[in-house]
Amino acid sequence: MKATPEQPKAPEAKDDLKTLPLAEVEKKLESSPDGLTQAEAQKRLAQYGPNELKEKKTNLLLKFLSYFWGPIPWMIEVAVILSGVVGHWPDFFIILLLLLANAVVGFWEERQASDAIAALKAKLAIKARVKRDGKWSNPPARELVPGDVIRMRLGDIVPADARLLDGDSVEVDQSALTGESLPAERKSGEAVFSGSIIRRGEIGGLVYATGEKTYFGRTAQLVQEAHTVSHFQKAVLKIGNYLIILAVALVAVIITFAIVRGDKILETLQFALVLTVAAIPVAMPTVLSVTMAVGARLLAKKQAIVSKLVAIEELAGVDVLCADKTGTLTQNKLTLGDPFSVNNVPTDQVILNGALASRADNNDTMDLAVLGGLKNQEILKAFEVVHFQPFDPVHKRTEAAVKGKDGKTFRVTKGAPQVILALAANAGQVKSAVEKTVNEFAARGFRSLGVARADGDGQWQFLGVLPLYDPPREDAKATIATALAMGVKVKMVTGDALAIARETAKKLDMGANILDAASLGDSKKEESAAVAESIEKADGFAQVFPEHKYHIVDVLQKRGHIVGMTGDGVNDAPALKKADCGIAVSGATDAARAAAAIVLTTPGLSVIIDAIKESRRIFQRMNSYAIYRIAETLGVLSFMTLAILIFNFYPLTAVMIVMLALLNDGAILSIAYDNVHYSNKPESWNMRLVLGIATVVSVIGLIDSFGLFFIGERHFHLDRTMIQTLIYLKMSVGGHFKIFITRTRGPFWSIRPAPVLLIAVLSTQIVATLIAVYGVFMPPIGWGWALAVWIYSLPFFLLNDRIKLLAYRILDPVKAAAKPEYKVEAKLKPETKPELKSTAA
């Protein structure tokens, strides 16, 4: 009987796989540079577990109990105890219900928000290039196991601890792990650690530790947790503090007068506590988390994954968007034009040498375009690439050592024409012709690659220029027009030459004021007022290096702009972090995605504009909630205080106040799903306007509440306990009407409410009406009086809506009333590739 082979044992702690000779590491891991089989990898995954840290799971019971701990729950709990002490059992059970309802709703909605963030986080999971069964594949990094052979290149986050295999040295950024600001050089045989970033080069590695066994632990965290507090949330929480202070002040006045009048102190204290609880925006944290989670899910459907929740509000205020040209404004589908050659070198030789300095498996668009320009792909089989040096942003070129069919070795390179010219020995005789041709190509929208060759150990000889054409995206022109109509200025940012940038900007109607970034300073330089103004007024920037991006963002922010910046490379990370809203475009490196607040999963500018529209809708919902919450609290508090002080009349009992708060909070949660129109201008928090509108709306509510009190007492001579029920129903109906008043800037009918909002309001109003009609914990008023209250409230609702419109005109005369969504459409003719004819110098 054949013995079953044993699984390789997990390395002992004493085995320092970080420093042992590579051959011994391979032996211990029972692996080789050819990697593992898929079957073996699956066995090891079961043995070692996923390549991730186990997240600390919060005990659900303890999490639920935490909702009973804190200043607001304490106040409610004291009110429960006082209700029991004075024997007000209806109050006791209703207030207890409020306490439980807040805990259940808060717990449930936070779980929903956490689940939404977890789903988005899964979409941003790092992938790894792994050799399994002799073939390269891209599984999630969590599936890596010790013994796997991986490939890492510029911009990748190292997915696990690995020993470097044969190849050129690489530069590794470990700043996030060690605090060292400068990249460290790592050579073949040395270790690289999970979470560091490849800054230069490309190399293979043998994984020796995963998950909790890694040296530094977890790889870079791409998604912030749901509890991140943004500037806007802080502003809304300030409103909460304002309402709490107001409530406590007015309640203190009520208690003082009650003591002077000789009222029962315990009952007065219980009532005061209940009134304070009702005035405090208990639902505010829940409404915030629900709105943010809903917003994140909506943006994900639009192919924009929110990795930092603060981005939702920041994006709503963006007024300048610095957009990469390649892949965002253009199709990122390069095609090769007719090459230019020097010294009568055949053009097919220029293409061949350029192709030998390219690598198909890197999936680089330039490399693929050059390789695609070969008339006969089989010709490459006659050559052996001995060594390949990939492109990096510093050197701006690729290089390969190649052995021909005759056995002789030569070197080829391709890259930025000025870089290749600087290498070439024949640059003096060809420079003027090359520069003239490059400018001609650029004027027609072509990018240029210089190609050079060196035989043996000889000097580089410039061969020619390869023109590459990247046509604008079909939707780019219309999208830019839409952005401009929305108050967002799109500025092109590109590393291409000035002429190419101007040509592309001209085709997209972006404006021709393109600055050469070479004239700009760096992040340490304080620009003069004139230069800063030129950056602000520019339509775009050409010949941009990553440090220029950071500087551009910095200058624009200092001039009062909210800046969005797109990026895809490892060197874009500082600018993406610096921007108010960093956006990693489709196909971005792991490092860029880690730094960005929003990650796009589809190319183009239109998805960014869609995300801006959605973020502005989310802002509108939060704005509506803030106005409603202030108006409702001001209305209830001022009416209660004035009625007690002037008429010695408690218009609502403690039970009524609690039920009012319960039903209001239940309905307002649905505002997170409401229909709104995005603003045609960047959003900013206007406290003066919010407080002004809320105050005006609350005053009308105060007037109609006193009106009902006078009618009931002076005209119909009703008992005050029955008047309390009438006022309870009126405040419930009027409070829910306020939702429809505050949710729109225009007339209440200008935007159709979402079905979920209508159902929530209708449901809570049916409950409130039935409570008043049949007298649950209060004297019943019957259907006749209930109908009368509804009829009485309706004209005040219509009047209040008209007064709101007048208040907006007075308080914010510049901004027009909310307009329906618009679409800017432009019929674009299909772009045609310019034809260029071959020239010889």
Image (cartoon, rainbow, N blue to C red):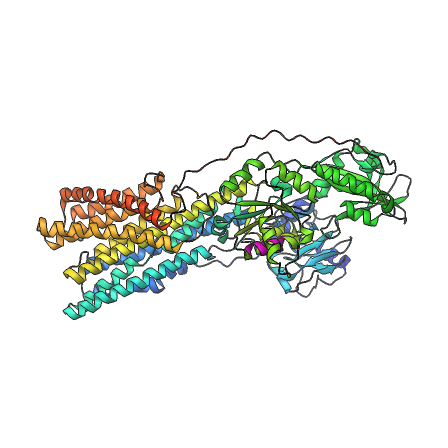
| Stretch in magenta | 549-557
**Where's residue 469, x and y in %?**
70, 36
Look at the magenta stretch and give its main secondary structure. helix
Q: Reply yes or no: does residue 717 show up in magenta.
A: no
In the rendering, at what x and y percent does residue 346 appear? 85, 34
Which quadrant of the view contains residue 838? Answer: top right
Q: Determine the residue positioned at 17% across, 50% down.
A: 707
**374 is higher (above) or lower (below) than 639:** above
* Quarter of the picture holding the C terminus: top right
The reply to whether residue 76 is in sight is no
| Image quadrant assignment for residue 503 | top right
Residue at the spot x=73%, y=58% of the render? 25
At x 70%, y 60%, the residue is 183
Frontmost residue, 287 versus 675: 675
Name the side, left or right, on which 75 lies relative to 462. Answer: left
Asked whether, in this view, residue 544 is left or right of residue 693, the answer is right
Answer above or below: position of 351 versus 139.
Answer: above
On whether residue 550 falls in the magenta region, the answer is yes
Q: Is residue 150 left or right of residue 270?
A: right
Q: Nearer the viewer, residue 187 or 21?
A: 187
Q: Position of residue 608 (x, y in %)?
A: 54, 43
